Image (cartoon, helix red, strand yellow):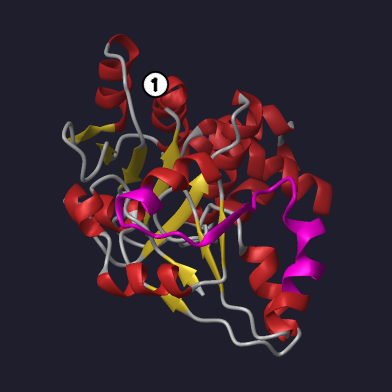
Amino acid sequence: MLVSTPIGNLGDMTSRAIAELRAADLVLCEDTRTSARLLTAFDIRARTQALHDHNEEERIPGLLAQLREGRRIAVISDAGMPVVSDPGFRLVRAAIAEGLHVDALPGANAATLALVLSGLPPLPFLFQGFLPPKQAARRAALERLRAIEQAGLSATTIWYESPHRLAETLADMADILGPRPAAVARELTKKFEEVRRATLSELAAHYAVAEARGEIALVVGPPPEQSGEVLDIDAMLRAAMRQNSLKDAVAAVAQASGQNRKSVYARALALAAED
């Protein structure tokens, strides 16, 4: 059983979740020390065991054996729904492959709560989890997203980010994704909950000087709609590269289309590799 737990406010713990955890033979926790506070608060005395990214694979055979014997196993994360940006996916996949029953109890979720508080278009939305911590990899991931948007994707995106990387991430987003509305949702459901709404560049400037604390969900609006026909960037690049160097072709297409130059350059490299 996958059991969602509060993301901050203990009042969001459901009665079904409490009953399920009390009845469990074993509760798998992302961090047993963190979960101990939650379990103690609701007088849940089930046996606990750590399940995280570093040990999940090796513990799967033993856990499947317990499930086959009829043991009741509950999976929780430090906050929110297990599996979603938290451990549990590999165990769920293995249990399903074995034909074992898998169920889940819904509850608090930071991504969807941030989305509805952001004031940005709720549908469609794309949850991306955490960006890579290193700047080069992070910017490459954002460049890929921008390329997909140029191919037609138009969705509000939701990310999780750590406080000490927030300002850098916002600056990278402003540079690569361009001017668009966004929201930083911080410490949701907790005493110091804050939702700051502005453009990416404005938020980057704010958090460059203001310290961010706590758990953070970052919501970014979809790209602005293009007027008229959708531009075929690939066709423009191929035509330009037939008569110009890659550098000059990128500059020409970026200027003509109004697209981010770095995104156009990344697409040009991909086309050159294909051709």
Residue that protrudes farthest toward the bottom in the picture: 99
Residue at coordinates 67% horizontally, 87% vertically from top-left? 100
| Residue 257 visible in the shown view | no
Residue at coordinates 73% horizontally, 85% vertically from top-left? 68
| Residue 85 visible in the shown view | yes
Where does residue 104 sit, x and y in percent of width and height?
46, 76
- Above or below, 179 against 206 in this view is below
Q: Seen in the image, is 128 located left or right of residue 275?
A: left
Q: Seen in the image, is 143 located left or right of residue 244?
A: left
Q: Which residue is mark 1?
A: 167
Q: In the picture, residue 252 is in which quadrant?
A: top right
Residue type pointed to by label 1: Ala
Where does residue 273 sit, x and y in percent of width and height?
82, 47
Element under label 1?
A: helix
Where does residue 144 sit, x and y in percent of width and height?
59, 46
Q: Which stretch did the figure color magenta?
A: 38-64
